[in-house]
Image (spheres, rainbow, N blue to C red):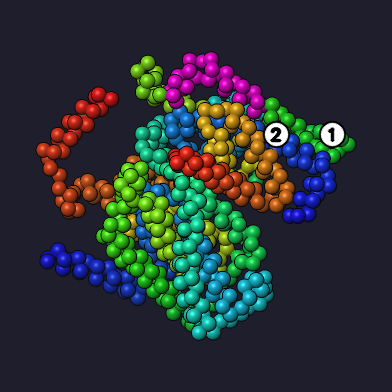
Amino acid sequence: MFDNLSLLGLVPMLNLQLLLDGLLIGSVFALAAYGLALVWGVMNIKNLAQGDFVILGGYIAFTLSQPPINLHPILSIPIIFVLMFVFGWGLYHTIIKRVIERDLFTSLLATFGLAIVIQQLINLAYGPDVQTAEAGMEIREFFGGEITIADTKLVSFLLALVVALLITLFMKKSRMGRAIRATSQNARAARIMGVDTDRVYAFTFSLNAAICGVAGVLISIIWVIQPFFGITHSIRSFVIVTSAGFGNLIGVILSALGLGTVEQFSGFVFGAEFQQATVVGLLVLVLIIRQIMQSRQRQVVK
Amino acid sequence: MNLHLKKIIFYAAILLAGIFAPIAFPAYTFQFAVLWLMILFALTWDILGGQMGYNSLGNILFFGAGMYICTVVQIGMYYDVGEYTAHFGAVKIDFTPYQYFTGIAAGLVLAGIACLGLAVVFGWIVFGLRGPYFAIGTLGVAIAAGELVGAWDYVGAGGGISLPNYPGGPGDREMFFYILCFVSAVCTFIFLKWLYSTRFQLALNAIRDDEEKAEAMGIHTNRYKTIAWSFAAFFLGISGGIFGNMTGFIEPLEVAFPTVTFGIFMVLMVLLGGKGTLWGPVIGAIIFHVIKELTWTYLLGWQWVALGALIIINVVYFQQGIMGWAQEKWPELFGITVDEAVASAEENSTADKEAVI
């Protein structure tokens, strides 16, 4: 551990490499986290199946890239967006609709059950092996090979950027986007103004599933997917949203990039098997810090 | 008087069933022992989750901590723990009966007490959190604890520790642990039955219903929350110690800190039986254990899907649980009388209020 730390001091380029990797991966985390912030802020659902939506999207991309279809994973993004949107729509009408009005723990536990079902079904279908959707791109070298950046990471960064821009544009300009923002501000007032909030909720949840699906495709290209990695992705989203607050896209992006970077550094210093421990440790840390901040004003984290 | 007698007969029947179950069905002794532990899990989870309204997803922390503390004490009393775990597999050390039983007794007591202390420390960390943050925060603490123990070489890290062999025949061993599980579950039940007859339960219920108001009424909410959690931790710690010895091999992720198996089972059992009642967790645990054993036997491969589906169905469609459902159906049995006139008047007034809102 200390060897690795001193190595970071000796080879300054290594820091840059880790920083770049962290930022590029963090941009993908930001997508899933933004989806969570959306459902949390608009319909007060804490979706513990968030990470499993991501993994599901990744597995669909993986399946489409396999022999019978042989679709390039990046080209499959629109298809997965639509598929996951429909999937989210179905889930909303069977399960989520019935837990919206209930107390907070209900949605948490119901989505946790959902997470178990999804991860186990994926496990039954694909087995517990680690998979990657092959994008067939090159790795660029800079500074005489001291810094390497895979093209896939750059492309996924750009794609994440494009998706984020499109969503922002959608939320600002479209009629449905305006209805979503109105509902999140005050659902009752929105209803009085003629907004069909039930439809808004359904749309928001489906949009979240679709965004997660896209994030999953990008993850499957630049990283690995495995049926049980969902919970780590969920906790990542929770860390990001808890530290950034919802309805704050800039905050979500910044803390996602920060999380990606911290993970890369801790993965290098402590070893890759501590990845989950780092994410969970950060979650506990963020919660403690927020508690201390709140208790100064004699309040609690609600 | 008649009711009193009925109650005594009822409890005596349960105790007798508990004592004779392993004698009548010796092949299932291990299953029965686990069932008593499950009842203990559900009862301790309900202290916070049902009575106090704090839904913890990380109570399994104390189970694992108790398991490790008990093991370290058991081994550490007679050998060097670091050496024992490092030579795991290479050296087979036998414990004499005296060493074994003194070790396990000291280990269980210390596990309970140490977990009580841990609950005070962790309570300080998590009790500023409310609602979903509390659930996620406790889940985070439990997962982090598992990962940290998995990196600690002194206790065998990810490789785990194998516990001392039981000095005696195989039949004796199962019976010994059955009795331990049975006694600890019954003690938990008796303790909680007493606890829920005191002011303590009223304070917990007040915190559940409205924490701010409870505080304004002069209840030291943080003190009550911490004490309630340390009770749960004490019994969970002991159960962890017993379970570790029962399986004979402990390891951080699957055996000691199984957040997605036992950690979720305890929540599910309470929800199934009915939150906030004394008997709900017991009934829920029994039904859940039977369902689990059946699905694990007959739906192999699909058991986890069935479990997830059970969670969803239970939470979405049947949240009041069996006891809650029974209370709604036969309120007289639970000593609840409904004054029709008041009830209908109240209904009208809430209807009015809703109309105004």
Picture coordinates of residue B288, whole percent (x, y): 37, 55
Picture coordinates of residue B235, whole percent (x, y): 41, 64
Q: In the image, is A70 to the left or to the right of A92?
A: right
Chain at numbered mark 1:
A
Q: For mark 1, what is the residue?
A: A142
Q: Amino acid at mark 2?
A: Leu
Q: Residue at position x 72%, y 50% from top?
A: A269
Chain at numbered mark 2:
A
Find residue A248 and name its label: none
In-front residue for pair B87/A228: B87
Q: For mark 2, what is the residue?
A: A24
Q: Amino acid at mark 1?
A: Phe
Identify whether B350 is placed above or below B145. above
Q: Earlier in the sequence, mark 1 or mark 2?
A: 2
Q: In the image, is B323 to the left or to the right of B107?
A: left
Picture coordinates of residue A200, whole percent (x, y): 43, 23
The span picked out in magenta is A159-185
- The answer for how far apart the CA atoms under marks 1 and 2 are is 16 Å
